[in-house]
Image: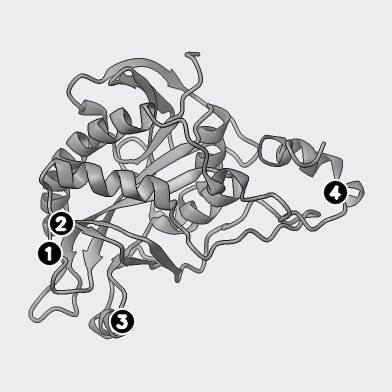
Amino acid sequence: MPETVRIGVIGGSGLYQIEGLDIVDVADVPTPFGSPSATITIANLEGTLVAFLPRHGAGHFISPSDINNRANIYALKSLGVIEIISVSACGSLKEELRPRDIVICDQLVDWTRRRMNTFFGDGIVAHISFADPYCSRLSTVLYQSTREEDVPVHKDGTYITMEGPQFSTRAESKIYQSLGLSVIGMTSAPEAKLAREAELCYAVLACVTDYDVWHANEEVTIEMVLANLTHNIENVKKIIRRVVRKLSADNGDCSCRHALKNAIITDPQLIPKKRKQDLNLIIGKYIS
């Protein structure tokens, strides 16, 4: 196993082909929550170790509702990751957010129904602050890097996570648009919630693949989504290279990394021993 990995990227397998990427290890990381979506590829990029994890599995066989998000986040943290860049395909809910643009979201609406969205429960209760779901410091780096690559980018916006796997009906899409939301996708929740509980910085590169079906005469097809996603991924590779260079020179602290301070409500004496053991990676600096 190589040295501690600071930066994690959750996205698709296409990101493994970044020019100059030197793969140094492939990690099969067990967790108390089961197996992550795939083995984690650890690579040297710009002199910095980066962990790449395809959230849908190698070959894209895991549906959004079936992703083991807890295992994914836990596995990355166990490797030493403190910053996660999430790459997410999404539909646009605003005319100005065009297909092939990128949105660096600052807000999140979680409309999922089937997903485990916390590490806690079963004898331990914690209430984190989640008013600002994406790390503002990391989001700023993503925005600056995207602009420097001359890729069309929009700062701020609200990402609504739907359950899926079906795309929206026209009625649903018009409701989302009427609420003033920006983009719609199937993956940013509960990733962002779990990353915050694990005290990791987390931000999203929301890659617009289509106008959602609120748009006149727009019908979302998988062919359209994949074609635009392929284009976006080529831009994302360049952006990630630049982001890694910036992050490797940034040793600053962040409030995300202290999210559990004062958030654990349960009397430590009442927390089951097994739960303490399972969550030690996350709560160990607060509860022994």
Instruction: Give the residue displayed 31% in from the left and 81% down from the top.
Output: 172
Q: Is residue 148 above or below residue 97?
A: above
Ranked by sequence position, the earlier of labels 4 and 2 is: 2
**C-alpha separation, residue under disc 3 versus residue under disc 4:** 42 Å
Quadrant in the picture for residue 249:
top left
Going 60% across and 61% down the picture, which residue do you hit?
A: 129
Say the numbered circle drawn on residue 172. Answer: 3
Specify the amino acid type for callout 2: Asp
Tag 2 residue? 101
Q: 10 Å neighbourhood of mark 2: few (<14), some, or many (≥20)?
A: many
Among numbered discs 1 and 4, the one appearing first in the sequence: 1
Query: Which mark identifies residue 271?
Result: 4
Q: CA distance from mark 4 to mark 2?
A: 46 Å
Pick the front one: 110 or 133: 133
Q: Position of residue 77 (x, y in %)?
A: 55, 34
> Which is more foreground, mark 3 or mark 4?
4
